[in-house]
Amino acid sequence: MRTFLVRGIVAAAAFVFSAAAHAQAPQLTDWANLHRYAAENTALPAPAPNEHRVVFMGNSITEAWAKSFATQFPGKPYIGRGISGQTTPQMLIRFRQDVVALKPAVVVILGGTNDIAGNTGPSTLEMIEDNLASMTDIAKANGIRVVLASVLPVFDYPWKKGLEPAPKIVALNAWIKAYATRVGATYVDFHTAMKDDRDGMRTDLANDGVHPTPAGYAIMGPLVEKAISDALNR
C-alpha cells in the first residue's frame, strides 16, 4: 500500500511539473507573418546600379495589386510585400525584413484600413498614426524615400459590419497628408479618386466595397507612378 501511495504521489508531482513547464513555454507563433516573404527576400539580388527599386508595403490590397505589377508597370523594379488582413503593427514588425533589407530607393506604405476594422483588436487613430510614423522614421533613417498612401474609401466592412469606418478613414487620411508634408514624404491620394458620395468605395471599383477590381487598380496606377516620381525627384 505504501509503495502504491508513493508511486501515486510521484506520478502526480510529475504531472504538475509537466503542466507548469508547458504553461510557461512560449507559444511559437509568427504574429507578423515574418516567414511569408523570407525565402523570396533571401533569393532577391541586390539592386542593380542606378536601379530605383520600389517596395510596396501593405495588406491584401497591396498583395493583390502586386500580381499585376508586371503588366501594369512593365520593366519597373516594383516589389510587392503585402499580406492579407494585416494591420500597421504587424507591418511595422516586418518593416526591416521586408523593406529595409531589400534596399529600395522608395517605399510605398498603404495600411490602416484593417486597423480600423479591428483585425488585431481595437485600435485608435493615434495608434495607426504612430505605426505609420515609425515606419516612415525607419525608412528615412536608412535613406529610403517614403510615399504615404491614403487609406482607400470604405463605407462598411463586409466581415465586420456596423463600424462606420468612412469618417474615420477621412480623418486618418487628413493626418497622413499633413504628416507627409511635415516630414518631407510624398502623399498619394487614392481616396478622392475612388470614393462615392458616402465616402465609400465606388461600386464600379470594388465588388465588396473594400478591395479594388482591375478598374480600381487602373486608377491607382498612374497616381502611384506620379508619387514615386515625385519622391525620387525630392
Image (cartoon, grey):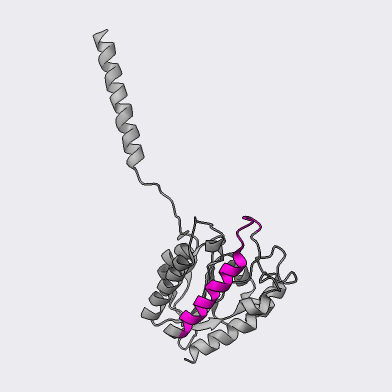
**Magenta run includes residue 179:** yes
Residue 155 placement, left or right of 129: right
Q: Position of residue 162 (x, y in %)?
A: 63, 57
Nearest the eye: 84 or 124? 124
Quadrant location of the N terminus in the rendered image = top left
| Residue drawn at (43%, 81%) of the image | 144
In the image, is residue 196 part of the stretch drawn in magenta? no
Q: Residue furthest right?
A: 204
In x, y percent, where is residue 165?
60, 64
Residue at 44% in and 68% down: 131
Q: Quadrant of residue 80?
A: bottom right
Residue at the top extreme of this rendering? 1
Tell which of 139 and 100 is nearer to you.
139
The part of the chain drawn in magenta is 158-181
The answer to whether 222 is drawn above or below residue 15 in the figure is below
- Let me know if residue 96 appears in the view: yes
Residue 106 seen in the figure: no
Q: Is residue 60 left or right of residue 52?
A: right
Residue 167 position in % (x across, y down): 59, 69
